Image: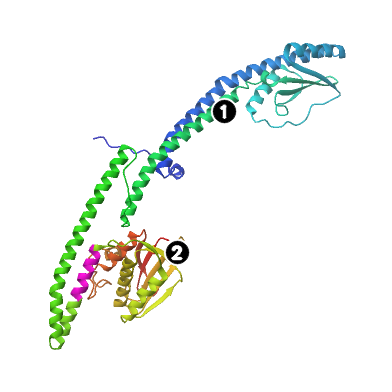
Amino acid sequence: MRPRTKLYIPRVIKRWLPTTLFGRSLLIIVLPVALMQIAVTWAFFDAHWQTVTARLSEGLAGDIAWAVRSYEDDPSPAAVDKLAKRAEESMSLSIAFQKGKKLPTGRRPSLFAALDRSLQKALEERLDSPFWFDTTRYTAYIDIRVQVKDGVLQIYALRDRAYATQGHIFILWMVVATMLLTAIAILFIRNQVRAIERLAEAADAFGRGEDNDFKPHGAREVRQAAQAFLAMKARIVRHIEQRTALLASVSHDLRTPLTRLKLEMALAEPSEQLEAMKGDLAEMEHMIDEYLAFARGEGGEAAQMVNLSELVEGVVADAERAGALVETAITRDLEARLRPLAFRRALANLIDNGVAHAQRVRVTALPRAGGGVEIAVDDDGPGIPEDRYEEAFKPFSRLDESRNQNEKGVGLGLAIARDMARGLGGDLVLSRSAMGGLRATIRLPG
């Protein structure tokens, strides 16, 4: 097999290239059309317009040279009148003699400097006397002045005698054609890209646990990708339902003997062994609850806008009623779109982890600079090494000498909390706390 050759694009060019599929598709279509139009226009100017203009300018310059020589041969008023009449009738030139005048010293810039250069070159080749001309003052005429003895010979010539005036129409047609092709390309590309955007929106909504009415449409390849996504979605949903049903069944089957054991212990004589057994039962019940919570994920709970400040205060109050001491720094009237029960469970897990491994725990809730909200749980405990942060998020992970190693935990608390945050379009990250321990930060979009 021949190795594939990678197209090398300089970094400077990549920086200016569009990043979206719409922009790149439009560039693929519009850029060649624009380059072709520019090449055709350039060829037209070089091979036709400038050539024709040069020939016209040479012809006009020859007529003006004839008029100047005729005046120099006989500068009398009668001869000038006869010259002006003959030039008007046969050459469409308006000639007037301005006695004692001098040539203007300045010239206004022209929009088509190349055409002025053609006329300048033609007049320089045909005239020996100083001259001056202006192509901007009048729309249909060119003002040409030649310095002669005792004054200035002023000549007005029709513009189309010096320039190929139809060239502007060609340029206009080229611009209109380019704009029309670009508009058609934008319309068709936008329709194709929209189908991909809807597929991405459906995938993102499914990742957040939302169900939207998505139907494949667009090009055949896009429809195939959409159908593959729907099939994958159905398989994932079926797998989750089976896993949830399995763990729910196991949880129900285990709760029955646990309940009998709790009843028998309640009727037994108090002793140290009995209290230890009650602790083991409580741990088993907590483990079953965590397994079931992890299996269910966010369940069927719908996301909604809630008062985040009140929700966080409620979770902290529940922790304090259980005997924890938690400091708070909560901004008032924060709002966020989330699943209240899943969020309460995730934040309670983070607080419980902090309380189990530290003396001080602080919960802060504040708006983020770039939008959204941020809830952080800090503590002064031993923390987790930075190189093991991601490992701590793995389900059933119990790090040695770490925060996940406790009597009640099974290594699912951080996994459940991160799933909750990412399901809402946010994230849960770990970092070093200013208090010396661990900081767990839930970031949620606004």
In this rendering, is residue 421 above or below 356? above
- Tell me which corner region of the image, top left, top right, bottom left or bottom right, holds residue 97: top right
Residue occupying image coordinates x 39% and y 42%: 193
* Callout 2 secondary element: loop
Mark 1 crowdedness (10 Å alpha carbons): few <14, some 14-19, many ≥20: few
Residue of label 1: 172
Question: Residue 374 in the image: x percent, y percent?
Answer: 41, 66
In this rendering, is residue 48 above or below 432? above
Q: Is 62 left, or right, of 11 in this rendering?
A: right
Q: Is residue 284 magenta?
A: yes
- Tell me which corner region of the image, top left, top right, bottom left or bottom right, holds residue 376: bottom left
* Of 120 and 97, the residue lying toward us: 97
Question: Residue 267 in the image: x percent, y percent?
Answer: 13, 85
Residue of label 2: 368
Q: Is 290 left, or right, of 263 in this rendering?
A: right
* Callout 1 secondary element: helix
Three-letter amino acid code of the residue under disc 2: Arg
* Of 275 and 314, the residue lying toward us: 314
**Sooner in the amino-acid sequence: mark 2 or mark 1:** 1
Mark 2 crowdedness (10 Å alpha carbons): few <14, some 14-19, many ≥20: some
The quadrant of the image that shows the N terminus is top left
- Tell me which corner region of the image, top left, top right, bottom left or bottom right, holds residue 242: bottom left
Question: Residue 196 in the image: x percent, y percent?
Answer: 36, 44
Three-letter amino acid code of the residue under disc 1: Leu
Residue occupying image coordinates x 33% and y 77%: 318
Which residue range is magenta in the image?
A: 283-295
